[in-house]
Image (tube, rainbow, N blue to C red):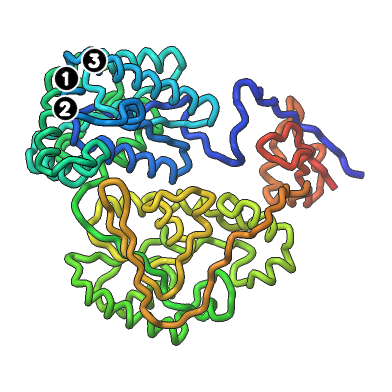
């Protein structure tokens, strides 16, 4: 007869831990406000948007709150730089009201939308304004991290003004020369009251100062994991013009058979594509191009045709389909119908048995993204799921959309990062291939895994395990097989574990 021992786990209070969306990772133990600091045309909005895109991609819900948008909603017709004079009392009242409105929205974002990071994109050039923000955060238990962009290089400033600022809604009806003069006067207005973050006076604050778009950094009092990741990311990005080329491997033998995963070589059409890709890359005349592949045969064979050195990344390997490797989707649906349905229900977070999820893949690819941000021109020869993850980062796509991005075989995507986004050009190299894309299902069912009994392999280790003050050894006896039975199908919330011994 089987003996049953109950191991009771303490129940987590729902008041201490408010409900979050399914399997969302919690990177911060309390909400964090990222506060931008600096004169106009110093790249604050560029940093805000790029950082927000990165944090959302790694699974940290983040949103930008741009003060300029709040101001434009209140003052719908911009006249000239005099609105920003520090002695313009009427304008100062409007600007303070806009800041208060933005802070209120940040509070709502944290409490009602379960946001984890808010980026307050504004000049915040005075100690008074920064003091208001610190008080606001302290009252509510938020952490604050300042990012100050300092730039005294006239060429960088002018390039930023010409590329970004003159096309803003403020200068919609302005001549370019008039707009440039007005914007420079606006900067002068801010200079009158600008007080930079000070190494001594502000040593109790957490911040990073970025000088001249990354030529030098000053980091002070980093408090937690999320701030460390932000600093590391900011120290890797650059604004040098470059292009990133993404391509899947040529069609593989398993692609032809409709089977997923595996490590097969290229088909005859795949070999033709490898040659066509080499011709295409030569025609692009790319300066100092670097080529990256995965460790899998099909990407290496594709790169070999280029006739140039290439670097292999294990992190670029295709998503691991676990027990479903080298199976057709029809076979998976027939033999693992529950798994097939669960994947359709939440393709981003679904993990193949003994395999990976797209969420796992994103975390595996984070070092690749960091290195791509450091590099200039790169060709990445990879796989469908990997290409989707990389593309989602550059195009700021949601976790829900990521697994359904179209990345067809024998097509090159050229990504050119811009100030506030990314330009995408698609080149089909006219070599026919099978279609491996599966569309998003039109009907989703709300499924949950059934209760399961799992064989436990580490029996020897548990002979020394104790429940309370009692050892499990007497209950195990000479048995060679026992199971763990979960009394709750959601493992995170389980309260009781039963050892079933036989």
| Quadrant occupied by the N terminus | top right
Q: Earlier in the sequence, mark 1 or mark 3?
A: 1
Q: Is residue 292 visible?
A: no
Q: Quadrant of residue 101?
A: top left
Q: SS for tag 2?
A: helix
> Where residue 91 sits: x, y (%)?
25, 18
Q: Residue at 33% of width from left, 14% of height from top? A: 132
Answer above or below: position of 122 versus 137.
below
Q: Residue at 28% of width from left, 51% of height from top? A: 373
Q: Nearer the viewer, mark 1 or mark 3?
A: 1
Instruction: Give the label on residue 85, or none.
Output: 1
Q: Is residue 109 visible?
A: yes
Q: Nearer the viewer, residue 45 or 47?
A: 45
Q: Residue at 47% of width from left, 24% of height from top? A: 30
Measured in 3D between alpha carbons, the distance from the residue under mark 1 to the one under mark 2, in whole angstroms, is 7 Å
> Where residue 128 sits: x, y (%)?
26, 13
Answer above or below: position of 441 versus 89.
below
Residue that label 3 marks: 127
Q: Residue at 42% of width from left, 77% of height from top? A: 250
Residue found farthest to the right:
1
Residue found farthest to the left:
154
Local packing at callout 3 (Cα closer than 10 Å; few below 14, some 14-19, many 20+) is some
The answer to whether residue 14 is left or right of residue 217 is right
Residue that label 2 marks: 81
Check contact, mark 1 vs mark 2: CB within 8 A: yes
The answer to whether residue 90 is left or right of residue 183 is right
Answer above or below: position of 96 versus 434.
above
């Amino acid at each position: 007869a089987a003996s049953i021992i109950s191991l009771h786990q303490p129940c987590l209070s729902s008041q201490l831990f408010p409900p979050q969306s399914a399997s969302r990772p919690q990177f911060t133990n309390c909400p964090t406000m990222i506060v931008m600091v600096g004169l106009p045309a110093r790249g604050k909005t560029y940093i805000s948007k790029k950082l927000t895109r990165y944090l959302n991609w790694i699974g940290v819900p983040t949103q930008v709150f741009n003060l300029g948008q709040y101001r434009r909603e209140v003052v719908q017709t911009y006249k000239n730089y005099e609105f920003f004079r520090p002695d313009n009392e009427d304008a100062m009242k409007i600007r303070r009201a806009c800041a208060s409105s933005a802070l209120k929205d940040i509070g709502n974002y944290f409490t009602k939308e379960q946001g984890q990071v808010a980026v307050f994109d504004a000049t915040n050039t005075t100690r008074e304004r920064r003091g208001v923000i610190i008080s606001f955060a302290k009252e509510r238990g938020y952490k604050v991290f300042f990012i100050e962009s300092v730039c005294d290089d006239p060429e960088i400033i002018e390039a930023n003004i010409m590329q970004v600022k003159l096309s803003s809604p403020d200068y919609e009806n302005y001549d370019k020369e008039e707009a440039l003069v007005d914007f420079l006067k606006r900067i002068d207005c801010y200079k009158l009251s600008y007080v930079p973050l000070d190494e001594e006076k502000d040593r109790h604050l957490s911040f990073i100062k970025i000088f001249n778009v990354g030529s030098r950094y000053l980091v002070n009092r980093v408090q937690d994991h999320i701030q460390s990741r932000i600093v590391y990311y900011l120290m890797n990005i650059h604004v040098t013009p470059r292009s990133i080329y993404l391509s899947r491997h040529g069609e593989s033998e398993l692609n032809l058979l409709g089977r997923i995963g595996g490590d097969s070589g290229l088909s005859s059409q795949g070999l033709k594509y490898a040659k066509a890709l080499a011709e295409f890359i030569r025609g692009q005349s790319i300066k100092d191009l670097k080529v990256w592949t995965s460790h899998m045969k099909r990407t290496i064979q594709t790169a070999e045709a280029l006739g140039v050195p290439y670097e292999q990344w294990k992190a670029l390997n295709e998503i691991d389909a676990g027990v479903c490797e080298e199976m057709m989707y029809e076979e998976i649906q027939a033999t693992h119908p529950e798994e097939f349905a669960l994947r359709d229900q939440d393709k981003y977070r679904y993990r193949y048995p003994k395999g990976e999820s797209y969420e796992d893949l994103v975390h595996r690819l984070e070092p690749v993204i960091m290195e791509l941000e450091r590099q200039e021109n790169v060709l990445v020869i990879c796989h469908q799921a990997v290409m989707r993850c990389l593309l989602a980062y550059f195009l700021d796509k949601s976790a829900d959309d990521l697994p359904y991005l179209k990345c067809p075989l024998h097509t090159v995507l050229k990504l050119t990062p811009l100030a506030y986004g990314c330009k995408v050009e698609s080149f089909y190299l006219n070599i026919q291939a099978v279609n491996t894309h599966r569309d998003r299902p039109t009907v989703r069912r709300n499924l949950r895994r059934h209760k399961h009994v799992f064989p436990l392999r580490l029996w020897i280790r548990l002979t020394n395990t104790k429940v309370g003050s009692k050892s499990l050894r007497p209950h195990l006896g000479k048995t060679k097989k026992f199971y763990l039975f979960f009394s709750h199908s959601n493992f995170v919330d389980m309260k009781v574990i039963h050892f079933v011994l036989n």
